[in-house]
Amino acid sequence: MDFSIRLIDPKKELKKFIKAQWNFYRNDENFVPPLLADQLKTLNTEKNPFFKHSEIAFFIAENKSGEIIGRIAAIKNDNHNATHKDKVGFFGFFECINEQGVADALFTEAEKWLKSKGLDTIRGPVNLSLNDTIGLLIEGFDSPPVVLMTYNPQYYITLIENAGFSKAKDLYAYLLDKEDYLTEKLIRLQSAIRERYKITVRNVAFRDKVQFRKDVETLKEIYNGAWEPNWGFVKMTDEEFDFLAADLKQIAEPDFTFIAEIDGKPAGFVLALPDINVCLKYNKSGGLLTGIWHLLTKRKKINLVRIIVLGVLPEFQKTGIDSVLYYELGVRSEKHGIRYGEASWILEDNVMMNRALQTTVKGKLYKKYRIYDRPIK
């Protein structure tokens, strides 16, 4: 078909790049429109501290009528390459009509840009890093995504694989049901471990500015320490973590964000968010004020929390403290009238976490996501 691809100037056309996403989900009942203000903030190279060490280029494909029929971002993450001693570039924010030629051309343009930066592999979808939203949905198209998880048409799998990409890693999402979750085994196990190690649990102090600042430092220490051995992980800088914490503070429920301590020392924490996508799927325009209105008027529809982070410092990972964290979240969710949880995302080869979710809390593997690689020619 007749189309062209061009590099856009984000200072002039970033909103156009973001709004193009709506073109590809017009008849998809599972699509949850992103908040425009949130996307603009995330992709603002002057405001997001991610761009103090990384670069991005935005490309759009347009047909002869000027309609956007595809988009992609190419990302050079210097902190990733310094950490992993490789030369991997990333693609993200990929959307495309069901035309292989358009998809191929988008990947080629992203690849050219990454090659000009000295990189030898293109990996994605990653929006912007593994600390953000990542992965292509490959199984589980029968329900909308939960908060801060990705969603895409099923034909994207074919577009990406036909473009020469191969699997780099799969990511799992588990559905948890309180009917199975709070088992007698879990109750006994966490009680014994709590007593043995004198574990105490406290909420993150969202409403105390001084203590909240201290708690953010604690969360950052645990997060960076617990995830450091994981595939593709890159430590967040202080500014990046603060940037994230400021955003999460706006939607977090204090009961779902808590720290476990052993002998007064922080050992692990849970960050779980109510699934506000249940409300935002009605926010068709992506506007901030209308989004807030839907959150206020439809909040009672929320019946799921997403476990975004359940992290334990390496020196405490064999204590069984994770069972205390799972139990505590289950009890708190029940108190709020919430039945379901989603634990996501989990690396396919994270043996300990997958085992705990399958056996300790009886989670059901119900969605899979994939990250792809392709050598740059």
Image (cartoon, rainbow, N blue to C red):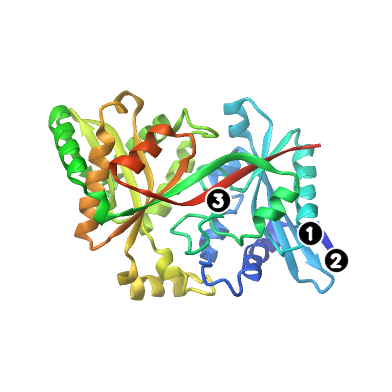
Q: Position of residue 314 (x, y in %)?
A: 35, 26
Residue for point 51% across, 65% down: 35
Q: Which mark is first along the chain, 1 or 2?
A: 2
Q: Quadrant of residue 187?
A: top left
Kindly report the distance in space between the C-alpha atoms of the residues bearing marks 2 and 3: 38 Å
Closer to the camera in the image, 64 or 346 = 346
Closer to the camera in the image, 162 or 196 = 162
Amino acid type of the residue that numbered disc 3 sits on in the rendered structure: Lys
Q: Quadrant of residue 157?
A: bottom right
Q: Which mark is first along the chain, 3 or 2?
A: 2
The residue singled out by tag 3 in the image is: 47
Kindly report the distance in space between the C-alpha atoms of the residues bearing marks 2 and 1: 8 Å
Answer whether residue 169 is visible to the viewer in this image: yes
Dot 2 crowding, Cα within 10 Å, few <14, some 14–19, many 20+ = few
Residue for point 51% across, 66% down: 32
Kindly report the distance in space between the C-alpha atoms of the residues bearing marks 1 and 3: 31 Å
Amino acid type of the residue that numbered disc 1 sits on in the rendered structure: Val
Q: Is residue 85 left or right of residue 29?
A: right
Query: Residue 346 — which label?
Result: none
The residue singled out by tag 1 in the image is: 102
Q: Kindly state the secondary structure of the residue where label 1 is placed.
A: helix
The residue singled out by tag 2 in the image is: 1
Q: Position of residue 134 (x, y in %)?
A: 55, 48
Closer to the camera in the image, 341 or 43 = 341
Closer to the camera in the image, 349 or 261 = 349
Question: Does the CB distance between marks 2 and 3 fall below 8 Å?
Answer: no
Question: Does the CB distance between marks 2 and 1 fall below 8 Å?
Answer: yes
Amino acid type of the residue that numbered disc 2 sits on in the rendered structure: Met
Q: Kindly state the secondary structure of the residue where label 2 is placed.
A: loop
**Split into 4 quadrants, where in the image is the C terminus?**
top right
